Amino acid sequence: MKNRLRVLRAERNWSQAELADRLEVSRQSVNAIETGKFDPSLPLAFKLARLFSMGIEEIFTDES
Amino acid sequence: MSCLQTNPATRQYLRRFAIAMSAYIALLLMVATYFHRFHPKGLFTYVLAVLPAIAIIAQIVTVGLYLAEEKDEFQRNLFIQALLWGLGGVLGVTSVWGMLESFTHIPHFQPTWTFSLFWIFVGVCTPFLMRRYR
């Protein structure tokens, strides 16, 4: 699944570690999601959406 | 476990695992010494022989507790993948060894080594899994 996480994070000048802290996950988790190697669960996707004040579909794009 | 990041669940896991591992080593030494010196007989022999295995079961429970307590789903996923590789590795090796034992004259594989072999596979595959997500 593609996502705009890296762009959204850059717009706020957050490092991966800062975003990880806000999400209460590891920096590796943020990196894996950003690079599209790991798809977050629905609860984590909602958490991201709340953090960026956006809808889930504005952050993640379904490729199918 | 190098795939595990430092968080409360990981610290708890490592603490429990260290306790269970220490208990295993201590029980194994105690049981082996007792058998060597006193040559127990009867039902007591079976009770003594099983004691170190209880510590191994405690280690398995520790893994289960970690998976239940780890809030970071990516780390949990990574650990589960490592466990599955470990399981696949140990099943593969023991199956091949079993067939070789049945039809050739290779030495008998002691089942007590299965648990150690499992963790060796987990340990070997973990850096490769981590590199995949780098």
Image (cartoon, helix red, strand yellow):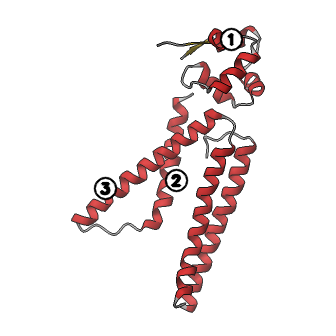
The residue where tag 2 is placed is: B119
**Mark 3 or mark 1, whichever is nearer to me:** 1
**Label placed on residue A55:** 1
Residue found at x 36% / y 51%: B92
Q: Secondary structure at mark 2?
A: helix
The residue where tag 3 is placed is: B96
User: In which image quadrant can residue A24 be found?
Assistant: top right
Label 2: how many residues lie within 10 Å, few (<14), some (14-19) or many (20+)? some
The three-letter amino acid code for the residue at tag 2 is Trp
Residue found at x 24% / y 68%: B105
> What chain does mark 3 sit on?
B
> What chain does mark 1 sit on?
A
How far, Cα to Cα, is label 3 from label 2? 18 Å
The three-letter amino acid code for the residue at tag 1 is Gly
Upstream in the sequence, badge 3 or badge 2? 3
Whether tag 3 and tag 2 are in contact, CB under 8 A, the answer is no
Q: Secondary structure at mark 1?
A: loop
* x and y percentages locating residue A54 in the rendered image: 72, 10
